[in-house]
Amino acid sequence: MKLIIVTNPNCPQCKQLSELGACDGYDKELVLIPKTPTDEHLFRIIWSTEDNHKTFKEMLTGKKLSQKIDFNFDTSSKEKHNLDMLNKLNSIEPISYTPMFFVDNGVEIKAIKIPKLDIKDLIKINMEKINVL
């Protein structure tokens, strides 16, 4: 089962999620949602690297990017996929904050406020509930 995370590189809660490593070890897909006019430029940087998850995490934590950015890389297919996923997820549950979590079948896990919460346990509990359905 894939964990789908609607996120943004400028989101403070997403940064906390990354620092906790709460989603490490899960098969996941990042769906990026813009909040400011400069976000689309950041998205293209993320999509133009080999390991998108690693680049995103480095952006969130303020680390120097460790991968080469290929500015000639055509990101249009990744942009289209991202937009298609946003539209699909938004039709299931309106996206009104980040991070938002979904599973690959489109069932929302749960909106989470990060501080002092063990997100790994919460994700596991909700994944188990979904498997029971």
Image (cartoon, helix red, strand yellow):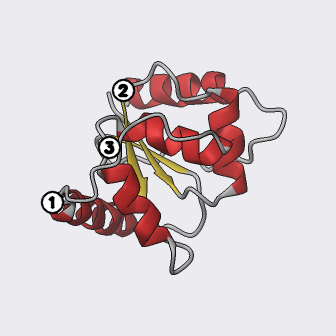
For this orientation, the residue located farthest to the bottom is: 37
Along the viewing direction, whichever of 27 and 123 lies nearer the viewer: 27
Residue identified by numbered label 3:
49
Disc 2 packing (10 Å; few <14; some 14–19; many ≥20): few
Q: Which image quadrant: the N terminus? A: top left
Q: Helix or strand or loop: what does disc 1 sit on? A: helix
The type of residue carrying mark 3 is Thr
Depth check: give the residue in front, 8 or 104: 8
Image quadrant in which you'd find residue 23: top right
Q: Mark 1 or 3 closer to N-term?
A: 3
Amino acid type of the residue tagged 1 in the rendering: Ser
Residue designated by label 2: 27
Q: Which residue is drawn at 66% across and 30% down?
A: 119
Choose between 109 and 120: the one closer to the eye: 120
Quick one: SS at disc 2? Answer: loop
The answer to whether the residue labelled 2 contacts the one labelled 1, judged by CB atoms less than 8 Å apart, is: no
Q: What residue sits right under mark 1 in the picture?
A: 77
Residue at point 84% right, 33% down?
A: 116
Left or right of 29, for residue 93 = right
User: For this view, does 111 lie left or right of residue 79?
Assistant: right
Q: What element carries label 3?
A: loop
